[in-house]
């Protein structure tokens, strides 16, 4: 569907915990709007936004998918995001590109771990948020109970704009409180029930109470509406609709809808609600930029588009998915990438329905589309004009939590593996790969063991290369605890021109998370200006090699204080060596220590396993941060060293018979206990001796 004005567009990101039905809901929206001729399902392997082979075989979303549903001469762009915690960056990327987040919640389970994380992220970026209660036909599904849970966890400003007709297995439709009408559905129908004014008599009191509560909430969001409410005693449907849309835009209210995506119940009502109460692209007014400023959204302005997803297919190649933030992006036009400082020629513009594409001539402000085979552009980049360049704000990518070394099963596959990993990193924001400078091993790093195993599976299924995984490496770091002076003197005379360099430095610990800082405090010509960068380079190379156990030294400052040089024998190489020697000398006096990554771990389990899990966490040097009841489950929060979590997944399955799950993400670095440090250092020294 082609639209010619931003007012006819809605961009929503379906987000939430795993198994809440986001992908099924996206499929239902396509079926109801007539894009699909049947309701495709995750379990059947044909959901349009889960098209990767790994997604189909595993039955859950790994990457975000984009599709669009035409409705009432509007275009609803849907960004379907994954719900597993290990794909949090992918979910945040989809939410960043949308104008509203639709938080999909299981009507039985209520608030879950990822639900909270995404709510907090939307709050951080001030994004309008709606909530959709899915699976209303399940046993113990209850709007009232789940609403209270949502309000207690998030905001008292969550307001139902729909009421369910029937409950659990008898759920058959919804009452639209905004327009005072009803939608009734046939189970496993096409979801296209037309609204009716024939409200169910048995719900008359509940409807009146809920609608009054909604009207009052909307009236309280605006002084003008409050005056009207006091004068008239109510608000008209139009006033209610317009007032609600503005309150949602400004995050004063958060509308709640309900349905059963798997059976097509409530889908047409949801499409109507999206158009009635969620903002269009122009309503957001500005979009953040990379320098913490804001870009005014102007439909007539110079084009600017944010690339928020990259797909790499072995057959069709690279596709960059972007959202137009300002102006109109046209096919067969050249745009400028300010990060890469390169121009990119856009050939055909693509409309997207999952992996299916069709050509379109242009995309107006707010619309979402794709372009194939950009050479220099990566996810997070901005395409704009060279005359009016822009760099739009992007998401923070958290550090990788776990690293494995890999080797090819077949000799000669190294180049194929490197090429495949580069392509996978283009589309997977949390994946990192590179060669360990100390060991020469190829490392792949991700958010957890399951993430890395998925990458290995993709290498095999998509790129036809197999690798062997070796035990994960803990990314320890080294640092200093006190300030210390160091002196490095490199002098060599072996006939002909000699080598001479001398430098004095002071190293100081930094407590602000800064990795490394170099300060030149030499006044005069003790060391010529041209040689001073060589001192820093020598220190940089030495710190990357580590001091205690071969791990990079960080979080310290170096002050270059003094030195000597020789008119003939001094060189950049000599000062590089002197810098390295000065660093090693200072480290002997700076009380070096080792740091380890500490993970924020959240375990969801039943009451019966709490004691065993707490005991196990204690044995792993875990520090419990709290416990919270969520429905019939308990959520344990703890800080645990990554080194103690490498083999946790099978242990958790063993303790709970597979009835618990956990997510973890990097929290911070902390000092390694001295006795454990000693073992790591001895193992490193032993390895060096063997290699000598």
Image (tube, helix red, strand yellow):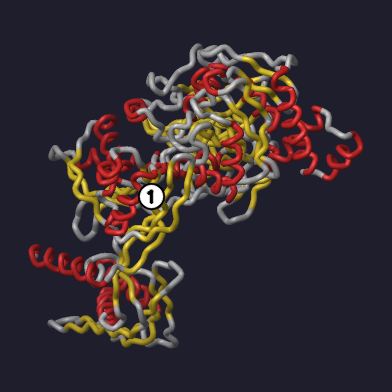
Where is residue 24? Give x, y as percent: 48, 24
- Give the residue furthest to the right: 231
Q: Which residue is drawn at 40% across and 26% down?
A: 51
477 relative position to 148: left or right: left
Q: Residue 29 at x, y = what percent?
A: 55, 22
Is 312 left or right of 149, judged from the image as shown?
A: left
Does the rendering let one see residue 310?
yes
Relative to 338, say whether 175 is above or below: above
- Where disc 1 sits, the SS reads strand
Q: Position of 133 compared to 50: left or right?
A: right
The furthest residue to the front: 608
Quadrant housing the N terminus: top right
| Location of residue 18 in the rendering, given as x and y in whole percent from the top left corner | 44, 35
Q: Answer above or below: position of 635 versus 365.
A: below
Which residue occupies 56% across, 53% down? Answer: 290
Could you say which is closer to the camera, residue 8 or residue 333? 8
Mark 1 nearby-residue class (10 Å; few <14, some 14–19, many ≥20): many
Give the number of callouts.
1
- The residue where tag 1 is placed is 664
Residue 328 appears in the picture as rendered: no
Which one is nearer the viewer's eye here, 138 or 102?
Answer: 138
Image location of residue 319, percent across then percent down: 44, 32
Q: Residue 183's image quarter?
A: top right
**Picture layout, residue 658 above or below residue 491:** above
């Amino acid at each position: 569907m082609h639209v010619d004005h931003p007012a006819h567009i809605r961009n929503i990101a379906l987000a939430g915990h795993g198994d809440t039905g986001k992908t099924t809901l996206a499929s239902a929206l396509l079926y109801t709007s007539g894009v699909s001729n049947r309701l495709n399902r995750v379990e059947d392997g044909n959901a349009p936004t889960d098209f990767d082979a790994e997604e189909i075989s595993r039955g859950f979303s790994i990457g975000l998918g984009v599709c669009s549903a035409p409705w009432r001469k509007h275009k609803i762009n849907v960004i379907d995001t994954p719900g597993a915690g290990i794909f949090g960056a992918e979910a945040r990327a989809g939410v960043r590109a949308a104008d509203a987040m639709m938080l999909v919640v299981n009507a039985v389970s209520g608030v879950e771990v990822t639900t909270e994380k995404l709510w907090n992220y939307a709050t951080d970026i001030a994004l309008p948020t709606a909530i959709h209660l899915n699976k209303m036909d399940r046993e113990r599904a209850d709007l009232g109970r789940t609403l209270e849970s949502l309000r207690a966890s998030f905001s008292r400003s969550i307001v139902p704009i729909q009421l369910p007709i029937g409950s659990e297995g008898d759920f058959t439709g919804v009452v639209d409180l905004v327009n005072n009408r009803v939608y009734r559905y046939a189970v496993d129908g096409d979801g296209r029930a037309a609204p009716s004014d024939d409200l169910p008599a048995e719900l008359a009191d509940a409807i009146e109470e809920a609608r009054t509560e909604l009207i009052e909430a909307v009236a309280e969001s605006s002084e003008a509406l409050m005056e009207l409410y006091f004068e008239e005693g109510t608000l008209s449907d139009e006033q209610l609709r317009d007032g609600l849309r503005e309150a949602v835009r400004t995050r004063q209210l958060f509308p709640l809808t309900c349905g059963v995506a798997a059976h097509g119940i409530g889908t047409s009502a949801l499409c109507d609600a999206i158009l009635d109460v969620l903002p269009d692209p122009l309503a957001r007014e500005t979009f953040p930029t990379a320098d913490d400023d804001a870009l005014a959204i102007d439909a007539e302005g110079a084009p600017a588009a944010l690339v928020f997803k990259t797909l790499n297919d072995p057959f069709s190649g690279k596709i960059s998915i972007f959202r137009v933030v300002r102006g109109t992006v046209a096919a067969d036009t050249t745009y400028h990438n300010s990060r890469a400082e390169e121009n990119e020629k856009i050939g055909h513009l693509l409309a997207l329905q999952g992996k299916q594409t069709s050509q379109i001539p242009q995309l107006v402000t707010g619309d979402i589309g794709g372009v194939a085979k950009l050479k220099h552009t990566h996810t997070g980049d901005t395409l704009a004009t060279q005359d009016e360049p822009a760099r739009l704000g992007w998401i923070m990518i958290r550090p990788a939590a776990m690293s494995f070394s890999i080797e090819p099963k077949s000799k000669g596959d190294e180049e194929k593996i490197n090429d495949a990993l580069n392509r996978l990193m283009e589309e997977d924001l949390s994946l990192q790969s590179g060669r360990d400078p100390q060991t020469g091993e190829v490392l792949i790093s991700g958010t957890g063991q399951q993430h890395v195993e998925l990458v290995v599976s993709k290498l095999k299924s998509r790129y036809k290369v197999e690798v062997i995984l070796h035990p994960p490496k803990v990314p320890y770091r080294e640092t200093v605890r006190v300030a210390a002076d160091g002196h490095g003197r490199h002098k060599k005379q072996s006939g002909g021109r000699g080598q001479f360099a001398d430098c004095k430095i002071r190293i100081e610990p930094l407590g602000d998370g800064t990795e490394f800082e170099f300060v030149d405090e030499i006044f005069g010509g003790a060391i010529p200006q041209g040689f001073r960068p060589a001192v820093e380079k020598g220190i940089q190379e030495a710190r990357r090699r580590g001091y205690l156990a071969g791990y990079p030294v960080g979080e310290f400052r170096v002050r270059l204080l003094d030195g000597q040089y020789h008119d003939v024998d001094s060189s950049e190489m000599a000062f590089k060596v002197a810098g390295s020697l000065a660093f090693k000398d200072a480290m002997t006096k700076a009380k070096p220590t080792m740091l380890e990554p500490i993970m924020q771990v959240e375990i969801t389990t039943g009451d019966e396993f709490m004691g065993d899990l707490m005991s196990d966490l204690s044995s792993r040097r875990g520090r419990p941060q709290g416990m919270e009841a969520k429905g019939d489950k308990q959520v344990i929060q703890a800080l645990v060293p990554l080194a103690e979590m490498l083999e946790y997944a099978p242990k958790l399955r063993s303790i709970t018979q597979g009835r618990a799950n956990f997510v973890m993400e990097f929290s911070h670095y902390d000092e390694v206990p001295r006795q454990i440090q000693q073992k790591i250092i001895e193992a490193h020294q032993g390895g060096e001796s063997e290699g000598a």
